């Protein structure tokens, strides 16, 4: 049983929690630290998302954690890209006009390497490429940063969990130091998160979304974090999540997304979240510290 004693009361407080719990970042039983700040898709408010330039920008801002999205090419290379199509963030429609709808899974790594993934964001980033996961890991490592790695659309890519872990291992990201405090693997798919946990139990994991409190006990068997969108978040929900113990014997954490405004950052910090994921991590840090 992963439920700590606080959970029953926290669960019971849902709905009335905002009246009963103090709106302080330190409301959690053994918490009190400032929320960590995560650069969403890199510092994607300032550089094209999921590129090495976005990692560089996050590092330049002094942000410790970078988030990314991982998918797979037709020939099995893991690449860093958010959408299942290349159309929004590259010039694929010009380079390969006959290949609509330009799905990542239908292009080889060599074809994707030809694309410009920066011009859509601004001329200063012309020529920026879609990085492979390997390239992305090396850049994060070079900057001494930490990675919140999202397995995106895992249903499209059977076996991607094991392949992601293989790349992480090859790049030295599954050693003790990385496992302890430099890596979390997350997904919207509970099945995918569970698979990562079963393949490499030492890896910390996160489940994206806001599952009902009644389901948290089951998720706490294999997820260390529950990472919900910020708009519908409440102090009661955060406390309820944090009342469960995760697979590594620590309270579940809550990292919320995507917060780009100072007021919203202060609001969720007041709920006691453990982390805030932001396209503009400097704005969040200035608002709440962390
Ligand atoms: O890390 C949270 C966030 O990335 C989840 O949503 O769509 O930006 O991948 P999305
Ligand atoms: Ca993501």
Image: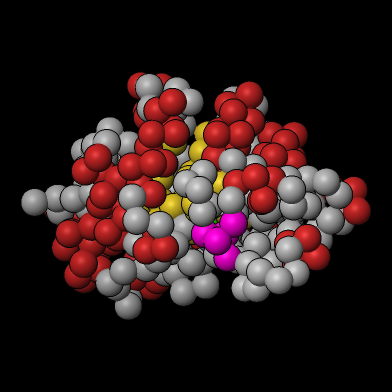
Q: Is residue 106 above or below residue 66?
A: below
Kindly identify the residue that appears in the image at 47 percent across and 58 percent down: 152
Magenta region, residue range: 103-107
Position of 44 with respect to 195 (left or right) is right
Kindly identify the residue that appears in the image at 44 percent across and 69 percent down: 233
Q: Is 105 a magenta residue?
A: yes
Kindly identify the residue that appears in the image at 27 percent across and 36 percent down: 200
Q: Is residue 116 above or below residue 188?
A: above
Q: Is residue 269 above or below residue 62?
A: below
Kindly identify the residue that appears in the image at 59 percent across and 41 percent down: 132
Instruction: Tally the numbered discs.
Output: 0
Position of residue 58 measured from the top left corner of the image (x, y, whole percent): 69, 40
Instruction: For the C terminus, give its image quadrant.
Output: top right
Position of 101 with respect to 247 (left or right) is right
Residue 203 in sight in this render: yes
Position of residue 35 measured from the top left corner of the image (x, y, whole percent): 51, 46
The residue positioned farthest toward the bottom in the image shown: 15
The secondary structure that most of the magenta stretch takes on is helix
* Viewer-side residue, 171 vs 266: 171
Position of residue 74 measured from the top left corner of the image (x, y, whole percent): 51, 54
Give the colouring mode of the picture: secondary structure
Position of residue 6 measured from the top left corner of the image (x, y, whole percent): 20, 55
The residue positioned farthest toward the front in the image shown: 98
């Amino acid at each position: 049983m992963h439920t700590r004693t606080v959970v029953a009361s926290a669960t019971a407080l849902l709905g009335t929690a905002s009246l009963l719990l103090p709106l302080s970042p330190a409301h959690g039983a053994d918490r009190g630290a400032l929320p960590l700040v995560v650069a969403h898709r890199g510092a994607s408010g300032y550089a094209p998302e999921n590129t090495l330039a976005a990692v560089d920008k996050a590092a330049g801002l002094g942000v410790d954690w970078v988030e990314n999205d991982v998918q797979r090419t037709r020939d099995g290379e893991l690449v860093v890209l958010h959408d299942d199509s290349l159309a929004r963030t590259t010039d694929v429609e010009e380079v390969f006009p006959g290949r609509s709808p330009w799905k990542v899974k239908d292009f080889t790594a060599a074809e994707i390497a030809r694309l410009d993934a920066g011009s859509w964001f601004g001329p200063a980033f012309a020529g920026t490429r879609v990085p492979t996961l390997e390239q992305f890991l090396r850049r994060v490592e070079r900057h001494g940063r930490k990675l919140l790695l999202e397995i995106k659309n895992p249903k499209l890519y059977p076996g991607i969990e094991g392949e992601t872990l293989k790349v992480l291992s090859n790049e030295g990201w599954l050693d003790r130091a990385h496992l302890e405090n430099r890596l979390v693997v997350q997904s919207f798919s509970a099945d995918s998160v569970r698979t990562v946990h079963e393949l490499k139990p030492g890896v910390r994991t996160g489940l994206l979304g806001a599952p009902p409190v009644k389901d948290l006990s089951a998720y706490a068997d294999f997820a260390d974090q529950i990472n919900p969108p910020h708009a519908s978040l409440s102090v009661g929900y955060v406390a309820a999540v944090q009342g469960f113990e995760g697979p590594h014997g620590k309270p579940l954490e809550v990292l919320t997304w995507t917060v780009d405004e100072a007021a919203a950052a202060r609001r969720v910090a007041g709920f006691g979240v453990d982390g805030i994921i932001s396209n503009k991590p400097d704005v969040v840090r200035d608002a709440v510290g962390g």
